[in-house]
Image (cartoon, grey):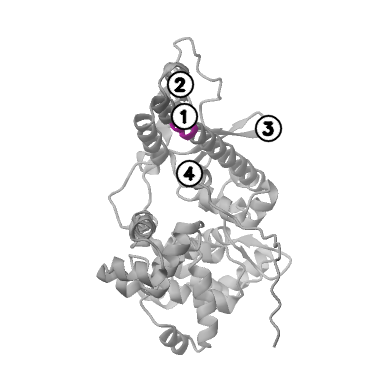
Amino acid sequence: MVLDLKQEVRLTQQLVLTPQLQQAIKLLQLNRLELEAVIKEELNANPLLEEVEPSPEEEPEDIPWGASVPQTYGRRPSRRKDPYEEERPLEETLKTETTLQEHLLWQLRMSPLDPEKMRIGAFLIGNIDDDGYLKISLEEASLELGVPSEKVNEVLGVIQGFDPPGVGARDLRECLLIQLRQKKGGDYQLLRRVIQEGFEELLKGDLRGLAERFGVETQELLKAIKLLKTFDTRPGRAFYPEANQYVIPDVIIYKKGEDFEVMLNDEGLPRLKISSLYQQMLRDGDDACRNYLKQKLKEAQWFLRGLEQRQKTLERITRSIVKFQREFLEKGIEYLKPLVLRDVAEDTGLHESTVSRAISGKYAWTPQGLYELKFFFSSKVGDGPVEMSSKKVKKLIEDLLSQEDPRSPLSDQDIARILKERYGLNIARRTVTKYRESLGIPSSKERRRMF
């Protein structure tokens, strides 16, 4: 055999998450309260940033306060009393805690999976603990569901791509490897090798042995291992139950004339600018001072750009939601349309993952009340010419059962038939059963017994 030695030039494309891009992604995921905390933290940490004091001459923005926008959440406080404030009960501003399972099931419903894979996914999510780890083996799930373990593993792979990063892992090693999928760069590549091939030695703290095994200096290995501080070993901890919290909406949707307007709620957020004092020091200071300030200036500029990009992206996505859900905003939940992440992604030209990050944990104040942005997304129901959002179908079922004769309650088959006759909606009985149970309504037999 003859060995042919030659040089080749190959062009490859690789997405590298620069520090700026990582910061932009982090900012995009923050809700209104978290963003305020991060801005204040950055303001304290970077001397090149300073807060712009509001001018006393600034007049309140001319917004139609009233039934559409609550005074307390406006961009600037209005001197006029808001009659709507008294009409909305205080409980409407309480945050309803989303569990980890609810968060995962919502992402599952937004995924383009067939019914069988949806069933597998729901089963797996039901076996994920509060820390985010899967507590059932693929073999057990396969036997329980009566499907090949390869198919279970395929669906698990989808779930492991959900938010929060690391969810659906079966052990700590897999949890870290899942989070590493989104990381690029030499240090992360070394860390990936260490976790894949030397995890036991890592847990024992055998750094010298690991350095020799991978042919690197101990300092280089330590630098890679320190990156683990940015990883979450309990991905589900963000969804641990907490006491009720008051919600400040991230965006406000209000009616202006015949159109709906979108306003980002930036009241109370520090307004930042580059410090002119330190810019002068950049010109007059010594080399060490100038190098330090140059780095801080870059960081300040990245942060300001990231903030601007976050605001533009959130406003863009909200305007798209308004376009799709205009009837809901005008008439209520009966007019909520089916909407998936792909619809908004295509409308805005953004990636689905960007849309998902942008709406996560964020709320909008609308003429219909306070809603999490996720609320506007729901799968479609019906296999005929008529399609409705799952939330609208649940509302119809709830209304039908509230009007039924308690002596002769409607069965799930009766409900499916009425929905077909009145609304032209083809819906399976088992789907009615699932929605009825999700509403906490007993079966017809139990309701008859209660009567």
Amino acid carrying label 3: it is Glu
Q: How many marks?
A: 4
Residue appearing at x 66%, y 71% in the figure = 426
What secondary structure is marked by label 2? helix
Q: Are marks 3 and 1 in contact (CB under 8 Å)?
A: no
Amino acid carrying label 1: it is Lys
Which of 286/15 is in front? Answer: 286
Q: Are marks 2 and 1 in contact (CB under 8 Å)?
A: yes
Read off the residue under disc 1: 294
How packed is label 2: few (under 14 Cα within 10 Å), some, or many (20 or more)? some
Name above or below for residue 432 compared with residue 164. Answer: below
Q: Pinpoint residue 207: horizontal percent, then vertical percent.
A: 30, 66
Residue appearing at x 48%, y 51% in the figure = 360
* Disc number lying in front (3 or 1): 1
Q: Is residue 62 left or right of residue 212?
A: right
Read off the residue under disc 3: 258
Read off the residue under disc 2: 282
Amino acid carrying label 2: it is Leu
Read off the residue under disc 4: 23
